[in-house]
Image (cartoon, rainbow, N blue to C red):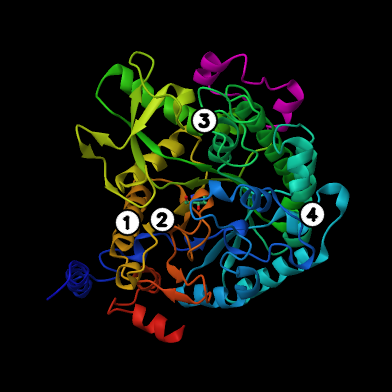
Amino acid sequence: MVTATGMAILLLAALAILAPSAWGLDRAEFPPGFLFGAATSAYQVEGAYLEDGKGRNNWDVFTHTHSGNILDGRNGDVAADHYHRYMEDVDIMHKLGVSSYRFSISWARILPSGRLGGVNPAGIAFYNRLIAALLQNGIEPFVTLHHFDLPQELETRYGSWLGAGIREEFDYYADVCFQAFGDRVKLWTTFNEPNLFIKHAYMLGRYPPNHCSPPFGNCNSGNSQREPYVAAHNIIMSHAAAVHNYNKNYKVKQGGSIGIIIAMKFYEPLRNTTEDILAAQRAMSFEIHWFLDPIFFGEYPKEMREMLSPNLPEFTPVEKRLLQNKVDLIGINHYTTIYAKDCIYSPCNLKTYEGNALVFATGERDGVQIGKSTALAGFYDVPEGMEKILEYVNKRYGNTPIYITENGYSQHSSNNMEDTMNDIDRVNYLRGYLSSISSALRRGANVRGYFVWSLMDNFEWLFGFTVKFGLYHVDLATQKRTPRMSAGWYRDFLTGSRPVDKVQDLRADS
Ligand code: NOJ
């Protein structure tokens, strides 16, 4: 009796025999020098939470004091223990055949209590060891300076991003990193998904420092109508200061590039009506233009100004001058496409992620889903959205080089090891999205790299360890890494080998 999973594997194997490369997709469709990698972030994988002089960060404190807010009550104290197992992880990446690894630096490991507390040499030493191991294996480091975590000291002092004093802190931290690692790190990004975490932190009250106000929620403090824009303003200016410093003092000497990473869904109108078409445009504006318009054009988008004034800060002439420092690249984290429904002319639930744009996002039209669902609500498999978002960003931001800094598929944590390891849906998802990038490239999109989220299972923020994004399964009790079928598929794609169940080789090696 062949199970459904078994049947799907047989079908894929048949396709593998017929197809010239990794199950219908060929690396030769991508230009030489295109970076293929995998991504992680410090809090989600490192663990070692107070080791070697690291300070507490906002996520350490939040997960300890609000464990009830995390689906499985867990935290990143140990996570995937990458801090101790980075050599093994680099080895895994080498076997996969990736040309780059995207990771973030833990701010509190470098500056345990911010600028005034001094640099922690052991923190610098850890990233030096990691970078050295990567380079020895021909893997290019792609570094993010801020991926949601920051020293708790700064969270307390400034309400993280609410006080303008945080700008100097970030500028200083970025400078320490450019100085320490910039001779070897050539690809820098200042922030990961500030557009997303700001909304969770200051509008919906879910991420630290858990600020919000009605109608979005009832938090102890906050103002959902104003604080997200004040925090975003400070982030945009922190980013600009770091880019200015990099361009002025490091770029020529070190020969690297710098940019920012934005979370980007693609929004389709729910109905072919003027209202929903405008709603989709508004959602794109509030999601993407919010950060990239100031960074590229020195001003917030018109729609936001019209709808949010006076809550949207103005850029002073001095700030505008700082924003003239141009970025070299845009990082896009793209996972899904979703429908946008207008909420100006028809009533909706506005206590949602898109509520501030007067938009309601839904994955269903007339009872039919926009794509196959995944373990995270609102994340659907809609590969053609990748090509659309690339075209959109290319057009609006003048063909600036783009890296897909995250794209990946979530599955529920399960005790059924066969389902867990034979992640056919992830293979299909990745193949679909990569094909969509290949098609965008043929139409002239300026994409330079792609990173699967994630190299291995990790701490998925409010979902704890209940959802899995890894090419590699991580056993939380033993920390053993085991390649899923998708790891074998990715390696076949990257190495151009014939996919005769290569995952067995990876497993035998691990
Ligand atoms: C975006 C975030 O950057 C990352 O931290 C998160 O784990 C993935 N998306 C999946 O939700």
Tell me if label 3 and label 1 are in contact, CB under 8 Å: no
Tell me if label 1 and label 2 are in contact, CB under 8 Å: yes
Q: Residue at x 42, y 67 (%)?
A: 471
User: Which residue sits furthest left?
Assistant: 1
In the image, residue 418 above or below residue 381: below
Q: Is residue 107 magenta?
A: no
Q: Closer to the observer: label 3 or label 1?
A: 1
In the image, residue 245 above or below residue 452: above
Q: What's the distance in space between the residues labelled 2 and 3, CA to CA?
A: 23 Å
- The residue singled out by tag 4 in the image is 111
* Residue interval drawn in magenta: 298-324
Crowdedness of circle 1 by 10 Å Cα count: few (<14), some, many (20+)? many
The quarter of the picture where the N terminus appears is bottom left
Say whether mark 2 is within 8 Å of ligand 1: yes
Say whether mark 3 is within 8 Å of ligand 1: no
**Side of 212 relative to 132 (left or right):** left
Mark 4 element type: loop
Q: Nearer the viewer, residue 351 or 281?
A: 351
- The residue singled out by tag 2 in the image is 408
Mark with earlier residue (4, 1): 4
Q: What's the distance in space between the residues labelled 3 and 1, CA to CA?
A: 27 Å
Mark 1 element type: helix
* Kind of residue at disc 2: Gly
Residue 248 seen in the figure: no
Mark 2 element type: loop
* Kind of residue at disc 3: His
Q: Closer to the observer: label 4 or label 1?
A: 4
- The residue singled out by tag 1 in the image is 429
Mark with earlier residue (4, 2): 4
